[in-house]
């Protein structure tokens, strides 16, 4: 069973806590295995220990799990190479904690819209059938369930489509650009991408990893098609050993404030401090944007459903009174 954001939050939080206390990664993982835990967490711990026993890195040990994203692998790899593994684990724990909280808040906020939607479907089927002369309760309920099944099927297809678009945005610049233009969600996606980029960039920079590898790893961690495309263009400048601040300033994939700060930080030799600042900034902004989306989306859905229910009620009574008028005539 794939690990949920809540399971991953616990996994990374507990490992960060034990590593920060001085435990080795094997010792920490075995300690967690000795306690009760969700099935998904057990799978991650088993993969980690199996890979470590085979001599693999932490990122490679977890890379075989389909639920582990490129963001996680990039951050873990950078943290391991840079000797900042507890901080990398803590960052991932915060990230998945944010996703888990958002999911709970959004599902809670969607309760009322879903109930209202069921009411609207009921009004559009059962009373209408009664007015039109349908007197078989099983047939009316069957019609209601059939319409409801169609709505659920449509919602499921829409969910799969959104998941596919989200996955494509990680590698396709055009899809990523589309998501950035979506109200509310666009900002959240941009801030999450920049949080991953700056966090991994800072970690690799502090570890002394070559700049070309650092930039490529940070671009992968962003899970942004636009940033990955920009990184390919910037790689040529890095290969020639030239400063990349002026090049980043011309790349629309990066926010203007960040590009300006990067250029001045590169010139002043304060890039490590600047990246640390931007990592904290974008983490905070991502949290605020996602919480806003978690509140806004259910409200928009509720408003749309209320309009649908009102339309059905008006349509029902319009049909009812039209029928009465015909009978009187």
Image (tube, rainbow, N blue to C red):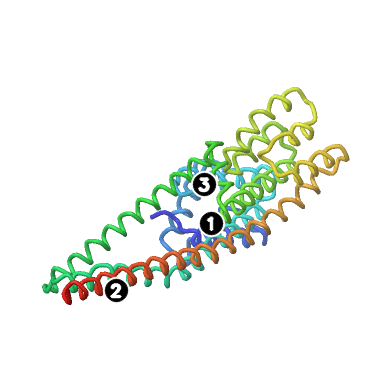
Question: What is the quadrant of residue 304 in the picture?
Answer: bottom left
**Where is residue 237 shown, x and y percent of the image?**
73, 26
**Where is residue 17 shown, x and y percent of the image?**
63, 62
- Disc 3 is placed on an element classified as loop
CA distance separating discs 3 and 1? 20 Å
Q: Which residue bears the numbered disc 3? A: 69
Q: Is residue 120 shown left or right of residue 137?
A: right
- Disc 1 is placed on an element classified as helix
- Disc 2 is placed on an element classified as helix
Q: Dot 2, crowdedness within 10 Å: few (<14), some or many (≥20)?
A: some
Q: Which residue bears the numbered disc 1? A: 29
Is the Cβ of the residue at disc 1 closer than 8 Å to that at disc 2?
no
Q: How many marks?
A: 3
Mark found first going from the N terminus, 3 or 1? 1
Q: Is residue 157 shown left or right of residue 166?
A: left
Q: Viewer-proximal residue, 207 or 138?
A: 138
CA distance separating discs 3 and 2? 52 Å
Q: Which residue bears the numbered disc 2? A: 317
Is the Cβ of the residue at disc 3 closer than 8 Å to that at disc 1?
no
Mark found first going from the N terminus, 3 or 2? 3
Q: Viewer-proximal residue, 74 or 95?
A: 95
Image position of 172 with respect to 108: above or below:
above
Q: Is residue 125 shown left or right of residue 13?
A: left
Considering every residue shown, the one lying at the far left of the view is 136
**Where is residue 184 shown, x and y percent of the image?**
58, 56
Question: What is the quadrant of residue 13 in the picture?
Answer: bottom right
**Where is residue 157 shown, x and y percent of the image?**
35, 51
Tell which tag, 3 or 2, sits nearer the viewer: 2
CA distance separating discs 1 and 2? 64 Å
Considering every residue shown, the one lying at the far top of the view is 240
Q: Quadrant of the N terminus?
A: bottom left
């Amino acid at each position: 069973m794939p690990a949920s954001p809540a399971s991953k939050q616990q996994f990374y939080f507990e490992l960060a806590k034990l590593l920060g206390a001085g435990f080795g990664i094997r010792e920490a993982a075995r300690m967690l295995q000795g306690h009760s835990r969700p099935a998904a967490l057990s799978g991650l711990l088993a993969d980690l220990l199996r890979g470590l026993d085979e001599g693999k890195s932490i990122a490679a040990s977890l890379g075989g799990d389909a639920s582990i994203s490129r963001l996680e692998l990039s951050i873990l790899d950078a943290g391991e190479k840079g000797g900042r593994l507890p901080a990398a684990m803590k960052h991932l724990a915060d990230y998945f904690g944010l996703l888990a909280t958002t999911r709970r808040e959004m599902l809670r906020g969607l309760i009322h819209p879903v109930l209202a939607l069921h009411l609207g479907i009921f009004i559009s089927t059962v009373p209408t059938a009664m007015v039109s002369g349908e007197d078989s309760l099983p047939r009316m309920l069957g019609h209601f369930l059939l319409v409801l099944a169609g709505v659920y099927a449509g919602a499921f297809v829409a969910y799969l489509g959104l998941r596919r678009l989200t996955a494509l945005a990680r590698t396709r610049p055009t899809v990523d650009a589309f998501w950035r233009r979506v109200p509310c969600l666009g900002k959240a996606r941009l801030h999450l991408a920049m949080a991953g980029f700056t966090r991994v960039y800072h970690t690799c920079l502090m570890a002394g990893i070559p700049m070309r590898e650092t930039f490529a790893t940070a671009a992968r961690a962003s899970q942004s098609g636009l940033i990955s495309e920009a990184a390919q263009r910037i790689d040529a400048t890095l290969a020639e050993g030239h400063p990349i601040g002026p090049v980043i300033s011309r790349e629309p994939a990066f926010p203007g404030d960040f590009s300006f700060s990067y250029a001045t930080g590169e010139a002043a030799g304060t890039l490590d401090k600047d990246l640390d600042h931007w990592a904290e900034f974008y983490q905070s902004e991502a949290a605020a944007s996602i919480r806003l989306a978690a509140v806004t989306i259910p409200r928009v859905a509720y408003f749309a459903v209320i309009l649908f229910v009102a339309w059905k009620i008006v349509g029902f009574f319009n049909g009812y009174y039209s029928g009465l008028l015909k009978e009187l005539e």
